[in-house]
Image (tube, grey):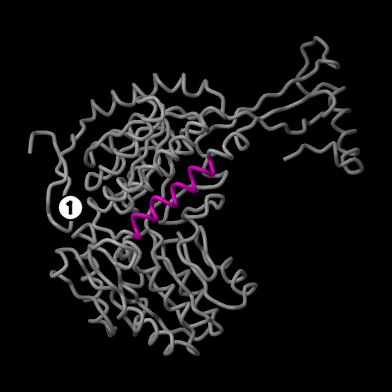
């Protein structure tokens, strides 16, 4: 390996897939300056032209999906279903912003304080250069899920993907160049932690998907520089099973939510609370479905669980299992390595007799562990679901949809699904993001676009009542007008300032 290079490894075979530069802070600075120079022409395009470019990019990515999926799988070890999900979710998000970005960014007319005498409008300006630091667990989706709205809003983008999985982002950005998006408008800088830190030092807005520890460091530096920061961080997402569920639907969905990408998902189902009335039946069906899982690195949608990507996360899973067992938990299924399949394969583990003294119920797992806790009723389940520092996602399973929605609103997280898991991020119109230790900001929906712009307000006074003078802004005539307006607003709602 040459000096200043990083080897990208296949976690299943151990083969070296590629070598990429370990970019220095000086190289990051140059990339940002190129982006800043190119951004002026990009933002000068009208909103529809940029949206059309995003649409062309999405179409090219879809045409290239087989090659992209192969790259994703090679550098992560995930199964074919997991790679396809990355492609499909991003395709929907690109389509959403290609269609709706011009409408969302259209200047908005508001009602002025004095509607006849004044008019006001709100315009939107891009921040400039947006930096994106993306993780290794979804190297394609999470590198581009913020890049698409940032570009549509008129920003230039510099992506720093994880040094473990940079190839998916590189391939996706090459597709952008093929459809005419200028090379300096969207770039990738590869490298380790120092590269990411340098990016925070130079960009005008920073978006990070990663650990809570990393997010805190980025937030501190962004605060020092007074630049906007979006942070989608760790999670410990609860799933609540009520007494009226279809047991098979709930058990299989819980297993899917916990084993997607071998559990290496920030919105993975990481703790399950089941009311006493159906607890035993639920656990029995959960174990039955777990026994049917197909693990491996083979092709086809019939492979349910692939390899883990990072040994650090595998070791964390094993430590959490050991801690839980030492404190009284039982492992009903799995929890063992499968070296016959590859060095980082871990069987999904179903744990029972768990409680909140155990790390597996309090600390983020990032692996295929499925701890199930018995609770008396829905109220107790909500209490435990909200007992923690994280607040990213969650799920409630019940046949009573009104009750499910009512309980969902009581869970302290950015999004909650009723009778589904992990569908929030796959719904382009729905904002998702965390609170507390799970981060700041929202992606998807209008909120996911407007975070990449600053509002710019313009007030135009017709000057009909303007008089030269040296009095303060509040002269006697204006004071009388304010008093009259206060009375009239009660009887003529149209006179109120609009939202």
Quadrant containing the C terminus is top right
Left or right: residue 215 versus residue 340 is right
Residue found 25% across the figure and 72% down from its top: 320
Left or right: residue 467 versus residue 388 is right
Q: In the rendered structure, which segment of residues is drawn in magenta? A: 81-97
Residue found 18% across the figure and 37% down from its top: 20
Residue 148 at x, y percent in the picture? 45, 38
The quarter of the displayed image where residue 184 is located: top left
Q: Which residue is mark 1?
A: 10
Residue found 53% across the figure and 67% down from its top: 411
Residue 355 at x, y percent in the picture? 36, 80
Residue 382 at x, y percent in the picture? 51, 74
Residue found 36% across the figure and 30% down from its top: 178
Q: How many marks?
A: 1
Left or right: residue 371 versus residue 10 is right
The quarter of the displayed image where residue 59 is located: top left
Secondary structure predominantly adopted by residues drawn in magenta: helix
- Inspect the magenta stretch and tell me whether residue 96 lies in it: yes
The quarter of the displayed image where residue 2 is located: top left
In this rendering, is residue 295 above or below 242? above
11 vs 483, nearest the viewer:
11
In this rendering, is residue 91 above or below 411? above
């Amino acid at each position: 390996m040459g000096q200043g290079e990083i080897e990208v490894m296949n976690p299943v075979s151990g083969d070296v897939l590629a070598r990429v530069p370990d970019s220095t802070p000086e190289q990051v600075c140059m990339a940002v300056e190129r982006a800043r120079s190119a951004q002026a022409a990009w933002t000068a395009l009208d909103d529809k032209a940029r949206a059309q470019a995003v649409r062309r990019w999405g179409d090219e990515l879809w045409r290239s999906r087989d090659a992209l999926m192969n790259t994703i799988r090679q550098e992560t070890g995930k199964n074919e279903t997991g790679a396809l999900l990355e492609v499909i979710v991003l395709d929907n998000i690109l389509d959403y912003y290609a269609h709706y970005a011009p409408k969302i960014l259209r200047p908005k007319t508001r009602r002025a304080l004095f509607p006849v005498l004044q008019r006001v409008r709100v315009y939107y300006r891009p921040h400039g250069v947006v930096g994106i630091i993306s993780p290794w667990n979804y190297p394609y989706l999470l590198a581009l899920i913020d890049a698409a709205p940032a570009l549509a809003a008129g920003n230039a983008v510099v992506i720093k993907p994880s040094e473990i999985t940079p190839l998916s982002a590189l391939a996706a950005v090459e597709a952008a160049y093929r459809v005419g998006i200028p090379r300096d408008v969207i770039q990738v800088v590869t490298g380790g932690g120092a590269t990411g830190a340098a990016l925070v030092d130079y960009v005008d807005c920073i978006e990070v998907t990663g650990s809570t520890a990393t997010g805190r460091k980025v937030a501190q530096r962004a605060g020092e520089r007074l630049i906007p920061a979006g942070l989608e961080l760790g999670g410990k997402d609860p799933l609540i099973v009520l007494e009226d569920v279809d047991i098979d639907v709930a058990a299989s969905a819980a297993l899917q939510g916990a084993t997607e990408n071998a559990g290496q998902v920030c919105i993975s189902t990481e703790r399950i609370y089941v009311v006493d009335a159906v607890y035993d039946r639920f656990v029995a069906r959960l174990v039955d479905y777990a026994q049917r899982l197909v693990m491996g690195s083979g092709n086809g949608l019939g492979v349910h669980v692939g390899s883990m990507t990072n040994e650090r996360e595998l070791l964390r899973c094993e430590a959490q299992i050991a801690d839980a067992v030492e404190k009284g938990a039982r492992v009903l299924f799995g929890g063992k390595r499968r070296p016959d399949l590859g060095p980082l394969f871990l069987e999904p583990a179903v744990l029972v007799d768990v409680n909140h003294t155990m790390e597996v119920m309090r600390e983020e797992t990032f692996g295929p562990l499925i701890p199930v806790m018995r609770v008396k009723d829905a109220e107790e389940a909500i209490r435990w679901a909200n007992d923690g520092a994280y607040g990213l996602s969650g799920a409630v399973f019940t046949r009573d949809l009104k009750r499910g929605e009512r309980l969902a609103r009581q869970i302290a997280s950015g999004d909650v699904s009723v009778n589904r898991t992990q569908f929030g991020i796959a719904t382009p119109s729905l904002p998702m993001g965390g609170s507390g230790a799970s981060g700041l900001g929202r992606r998807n929906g209008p909120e996911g676009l407007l975070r990449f712009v600053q509002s710019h307000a313009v007030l135009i006074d017709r000057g009909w009542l303007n008089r030269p003078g040296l009095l303060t802004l509040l002269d006697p005539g204006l004071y009388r007008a304010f008093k009259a307006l206060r009375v009239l607003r009660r009887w003529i709602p149209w006179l109120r300032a609009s939202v």
